[in-house]
Image (spheres, rainbow, N blue to C red):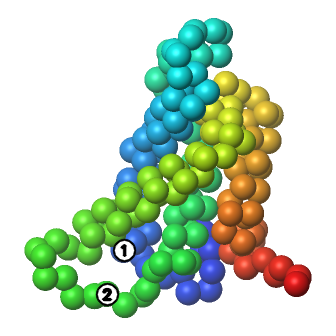
Amino acid sequence: MKRRFFPFDKNYLLENAQMELKDSLLNQMVEIVKDIYLLRYNPLGLKDKSIEKILSTTQYNLEELSIFYDELAGLYRYKYSSNQLELLFDGRDHQEKYQEEWEEALKKWIVNFSRSKSFLKAVLETAIFFPDDKQSQRAYSRLKNYISDHFGIKIYKHKGIVPMKIAN
């Protein structure tokens, strides 16, 4: 069952493009986070137990991150999508265009989010350290809260995307 994040979430070509890239981009997300974490918090390349685990893990638990990806994809459609197809004169079809734009936007978001140590830790905890533990679900909750704070929206299971009202 596909989840609609807002009433006019009907750009099915964009959604299909996002879902085709899902596995690849989830693995890339973890790799980007690993690289940034290691560069920022272990610039000398010293090895301890946790760094060894980060370096040696190549198969990631993507279950919780998969939900996070779906929410980011829905948020992207909410913020940047239109149901009107534009005319393309560069020889690409809409699927290729959407995949390219989505991949670029997601990678920029991940690099931007990675400025936060809590984001880095939450992704690493979810994908590498606590893959089958309740802590993975708590890390996912922190990711979700981080996105809410960053974009000023809330994503509810049944209501979808709802802009947060901020009092002056």
Q: Where is residue 62 in the image (x, y as percent from the top left)?
A: 56, 39
Residue 3: give x, y in percent of width and height: 60, 69
- Give the residue displayed 79% in from the left and 41% down from the top: 138
Which residue is disc 1 drawn over? 13
Q: Distance between the residues labelled 1 and 2?
A: 9 Å
Classify residue 163 by image quadrant: bottom right
Q: Nearer the viewer, residue 72 or 50?
A: 50
Label 1 packing within 10 angstroms: few (<14), some (14-19), many (20+)? some
In terms of depth relative to the viewer, which is nearer, 119 or 103? 119
How many circles with numbers are drawn on the protein?
A: 2
| Amino acid beneath label 1 | Leu
Up the image or down, 120 lies above or below 2; here it is: above
Say which label, 1 or 2, has the lower sequence index. 1
- The image shows residue 90 at horizontal and vertical percentages of 12, 76
Q: Name the residue rendered at 56%, 11% in the picture.
A: 46
Secondary structure type for disc 1:
helix
Callouts 1 and 2 close, C-beta under 8 Å:
yes
Q: In which quarter of the image is residue 139?
A: top right
**Which residue lies under the disc numbered 2?**
85
Q: Give SS at disc 2.
A: loop
Quadrant where the image shows the C terminus: bottom right
Write the residue at 73% across / 78% down: 162
**Callout 2 environment at 10 Å: few (<14), some (14 to 19), or many (20+)?**
few
The vertical placement of 62 against 50, above or below, is below
Q: Is residue 126 visible?
A: no
**Horizontal placement of 102 versus 38: left or right?**
left
